[in-house]
Image (tube, grey):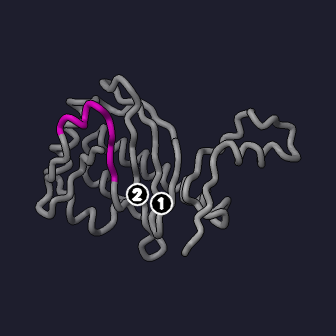
Amino acid sequence: MKTIYVVVLGALCLLAAKDQDRTPGSNCNMPELTGVPATAIPEEYRSILVAAEAMVKNIIAAMNDGNYNRYIRDFSAAMKRGYTKEDFQKNTALIKEKIGSYVSGSFWKMERSSQNYILYYHATFSKAGEPVIIRLVLQKVEGLLRVAFLSLDSPALRDIGQQPLGSDGISGVATQ
């Protein structure tokens, strides 16, 4: 059975404070990691976060601008096949109606499950009363990170339920 180490923000802050002029409670700028093997830190961890940050910024900007081709740029082949331009238009209209446009956001945490990297962001949208959780699932495909799943979670989106929009049942608005 594979042992997975759980690394939390507090432990990272304690480690970062060692041999440095920091107290354990100081801001060490290290996000929470769960399910990430200790061997994945720091190089793999950093490269995943850098790549994911660029992907999320691109996806959100494309949503705000209504640019489908830019939106799917980093999607896996399966995601591209299952998420049509019509799906994108319906979902972005629904998102803008329910929670508005993206305003700002920050990385929250990362999990690793098998070959997937699951990254969570807290985001502010113009009409949402509380943070929207963006979940981005990345997989390495032929050495490149690709978006295997994307969801937005907000109370305003939950009332619409999971509505399959693609012909294969893949929905761009996945709610929890």
Residue 54 versus residue 35: which sits nearer the camera? 35
Q: Position of residue 126 (x, y in %)?
A: 34, 25
Label 1, on which residue?
117
Lateral position of residue 161 relative to residue 112, left or right? left
**Which comes before the other along the chain, label 2 or label 1?**
1
Magenta part of the protein: which range? Answer: 150-160
Looking at numbered disc 2 in the image, what kind of residue is underneath it?
Val
| Helix, strand or loop status at disc 1 | strand
Residue 82 versus residue 72: which sits nearer the camera? 82
Looking at numbered disc 1 in the image, what kind of residue is underneath it?
Tyr
**Residue sitting at 46 percent across and 69 percent down?**
115
Lateral position of residue 3 relative to residue 55, left or right? right
Label count reads 2
Q: CA distance from mark 2 to mark 1?
A: 6 Å
**Residue sitting at 23 percent across and 30 percent down?**
98
Q: Residues within 10 Å of mark 2 (few under 14, many from 20)?
A: many
Q: Position of residue 108 (x, y in %)?
A: 52, 42
| Helix, strand or loop status at disc 2 | strand
Is residue 157 part of the magenta span, yes or no?
A: yes
Instruction: Determine which of the numbered discs, if any, sits on residue 137 in the image.
Output: 2
